[in-house]
Image (cartoon, rainbow, N blue to C red):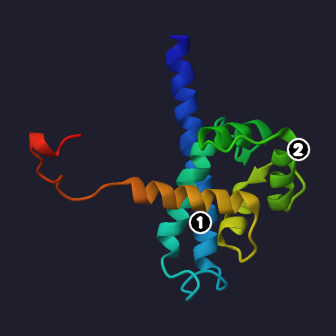
């Protein structure tokens, strides 16, 4: 019974987090600097992608990506970093001096003109994942074409 309650509570936390992130996304869509801009032609789609990334990285649904979550994220992408490098990455993005990356900080980084190490890694990872996704019908092969 305790596992069921724990799972239910975690699901509820995730739902609350998603609502908060959707609200922040709406603020960006309503902001004249971002919404309906040539710089951001498909802002709605980008914000949804960034929201999903953030949710994936915020393992405890706290609303922030802390040092350990960033460490795990980098390791999962094959980009292991030292604690000092991770702290520098957070400091580059953390506009509120919280020692972690809030969703607002994350969006500001991803949508901003300034390049940070974390932004470059995430963009590179996103491109790599897009290129790995085969589409369409698989080509027909016969036994002689196999190595």
Position of 8 relative to 1 (above/below) = below
Position of 58 relative to 105 (above/below) = above
Does the rendering let one see residue 76? Answer: yes
Question: Would residue 89 be found to the left or right of residue 106 on screen?
Answer: right
Q: Position of residue 126 (x, y in %)?
A: 52, 58
The C terminus - image quarter: top left
Mark 2 to mark 1 CA distance (whole Å)? 31 Å
**Observer-nearest residue: 141 or 21?**
141
Q: Please name which of the two marks, 2 or 1, marks the residue nearer to the observer.
A: 2
Total of numbered circles in the picture?
A: 2
Position of 1 relative to 17 (above/below) = above
- Residue 84: name its quadrant: top right
Q: Position of residue 15 (x, y in %)?
A: 53, 43
Does the rendering let one see residue 61? Answer: no
Residue 25 image label: 1
How crowded pointer 2 is (Cα within 10 Å; few <14, some 14-19, many 20+) is rated as few
Q: Earlier in the sequence, mark 2 or mark 1?
A: 1
Residue 84 image label: 2
């Amino acid at each position: 019974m305790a596992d069921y309650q724990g799972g239910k509570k975690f699901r509820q936390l995730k739902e609350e987090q998603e609502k908060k992130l959707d609200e922040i996304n709406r603020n960006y869509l309503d902001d004249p600097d971002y919404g309906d801009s040539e710089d951001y032609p498909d802002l709605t789609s980008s914000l949804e992608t960034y929201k999903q990334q953030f949710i994936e990285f915020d393992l405890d649904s706290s609303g922030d990506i802390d040092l350990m979550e960033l460490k795990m994220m980098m390791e999962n992408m094959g980009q292991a970093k030292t604690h000092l490098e991770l702290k520098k990455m957070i400091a580059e993005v953390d506009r509120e001096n919280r020692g972690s990356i809030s969703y607002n900080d994350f969006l500001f980084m991803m949508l901003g003109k300034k390049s940070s190490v974390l932004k470059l890694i995430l963009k590179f990872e996103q491109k790599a994942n897009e290129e790995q996704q085969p589409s369409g019908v698989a080509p027909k092969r016969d036994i002689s074409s196999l190595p």
